[in-house]
Image (cartoon, grey):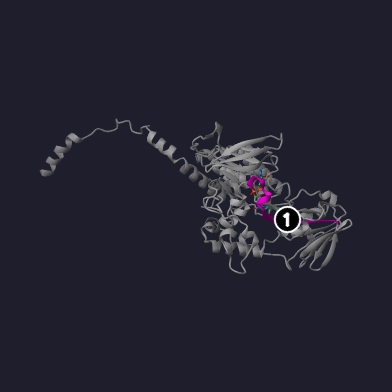
Amino acid sequence: MNAQPTLSAAGLANLEQRLAEDLSLLELPPKEWVPVSEHYGQRVYDAVVIGAGMCGLVATASLKMLGIRNVLCLDRAPRGLEGPWVTYARMETLRSPKILTGPALGLPSLTFRAWYVAQFGAQAWEALGKIPKGQWMDYLVWYRKALDLPVRNRVAVTDLEAVSDDLIALTAADLENGSNERLYARHVVLATGRDGLGSGYVPPFVEKLDRRFWAHSADDIDFAALKGKRVAVVGAGASAMDNAATALEAGAAGVDMIIRRKDLPRINKFTGISSHGVVHGFAGLSDDWKWKFLQHTLGAQTPPPRDSTLRVSRHPNGRFFLGTGVNGVREEGDRVVLETARGDMAYDFVIFATGFNVDLAERPELKNFASEIRFWSDVYRPEEGMENGELATSPYLGPDFEFTEKVPGSSPALRLIHCFNYPASLSHGKLSGDIPAVSDGGRRLARGIARSLFVADRQIHFDNLVAYETPELQGDEWTDSADLIPTLMKGAAE
Ligand SMILES: Cc1cc2nc3c(=O)[nH]c(=O)nc-3n(C[C@H](O)[C@H](O)[C@H](O)COP(=O)(O)OP(=O)(O)OC[C@H]3O[C@@H](n4cnc5c(N)ncnc54)[C@H](O)[C@@H]3O)c2cc1C
């Protein structure tokens, strides 16, 4: 039977009631089972999740759904401003199609669709094209509230330290009052986003340029100040288009897209083969095959969304310069000159939409572990012609997204730190940085942590097994019939 779900605009309160019922039917969240542990009298968290963007929320929820509830999720951003959606993501709508169930963890009443229909009705859902980015943020805020997730905002994790092979200390800086707190955790999840192991990348020659001339696409840019200015945007991805469009809409005199490629990529390769096979199978591939899949994907590049590209090209003063790689930059008076493969080009301001890189020196929270972490470049040599810098700097993760050691045995506590962000893609596939398979990623992560906690606490669980003495039978349910045995022999002889 192919019945349509009967969703109607009955308001969020009703949806929350339905969600509560669904959770109750599934006996979720289950009872807590991890033994309490302390360090010098201070309660130790079973897990601390750093980052309350989409991945951090899904990770925290996935742990809760496995009965791991002594968890804390921290984000340096204010509530409702986590992640890129209403900060540096300058698109109008998500690229992802509205039908993806993303963070919903298999619960119908936790989907974006249920949230949307509950407020605007089924007809509005049918009429909706792509999801406005502000509504996606609103949904994530609701998700956190509906699942009652333990998130603290305006807290930055500035340091991680191995207290022992089984315990991590975190320094949590309260950005409101300037205080520092030392927290202890048995597992740490880095849900720190696209730049979670590094920062926004710009070509090295840009660093010498005065900051008044340039920004990275993920910076907080004052677009109003670009009114009447000539702007260049270097790059051709989604962010390049969205930044260019935002500058044009803010009244820039002109915006030039400076693009190294002779043509824009047109095919979204990895999305094209998406399936449960990829989601669950990718991690089972050999290193060779993992590399081959992602090297091909990165080589082909992800096209900018059609809507974002049209948002630029519909402005007559939005121009595209292809085959125009930038080789250098210099300042000339109030202008910045891009030295390109096709000659010098002068602008008032340049936005570099040149992506993100892995650079642990940029992440204070990882400074104590930076030299210990194993990367793909430590273990894998691609064939000639298959080299790729982004893949080479991906962390070489274990089956539960945990870091592995560059030198085995040198930093055993590394296995307690789980890298649940975009750079995990080469080890696990795209389970920790995009909407489509984030629930699968969260569940894989949470199951791994559950297994690790249970194994670590095996003595306590065994003692509980031995000590467990609650009878199911009372002893009055049967009588021993041994006195009948002679009569049975007698019956057989006859
Ligand atoms: C312009 C743009 C458009 C996108 N569009 C889509 C799309 O349509 N579909 C899609 O699937 N994906 C899209 N993405 C990818 C998007 O980044 C991810 O889907 C999503 O944000 C991943 O969630 P995350 O939790 O990994 O990272 P984020 O959402 O970035 O969250 C990371 C969080 O970690 C916090 N944090 C980092 N370091 C610390 C620290 N030390 N202490 C405390 N907090 C910390 C940050 O404040 C942040 O809130 C887009 C990305 C961009 C930039």
Q: What stretch is highlighted in magenta?
A: 348-367
Residue 44 in sight in this render: yes
- SS label for mark 1: helix
Residue 38, relative to residue 89: is it above or below?
A: above
Is label 1 within 8 A of ligand 1 (CB to nearest ligand atom)?
yes
For the point 44% across and 41% down, the residue is 458
Residue extending farthest right: 333
Residue 326 picture location, percent across and down: 77, 63
- Report the residue marked by disc 1: 239
| Residue 378 or residue 476, whichever sits in front | 378
Tell me: 292 left or right of 343: left
Residue 118 in sight in this render: no
| Residue 129 or residue 86, whichever sits in front | 86
For the point 38% across and 36% down, the residue is 466
For the point 58% across and 54% down, the residue is 374
Quadrant holding the C terminus: top left
Residue 315 picture location, percent across and down: 82, 59
Residue extending farthest left: 494
Q: How many residues crowd mark 1 within 10 Å: few (<14), some (14–19), many (20+)?
A: many
Residue 270 picture location, percent across and down: 61, 61
Of the residues shown, which amino acid type is indicated by label 1? Ser
Magenta stretch encompasses residue 69: no
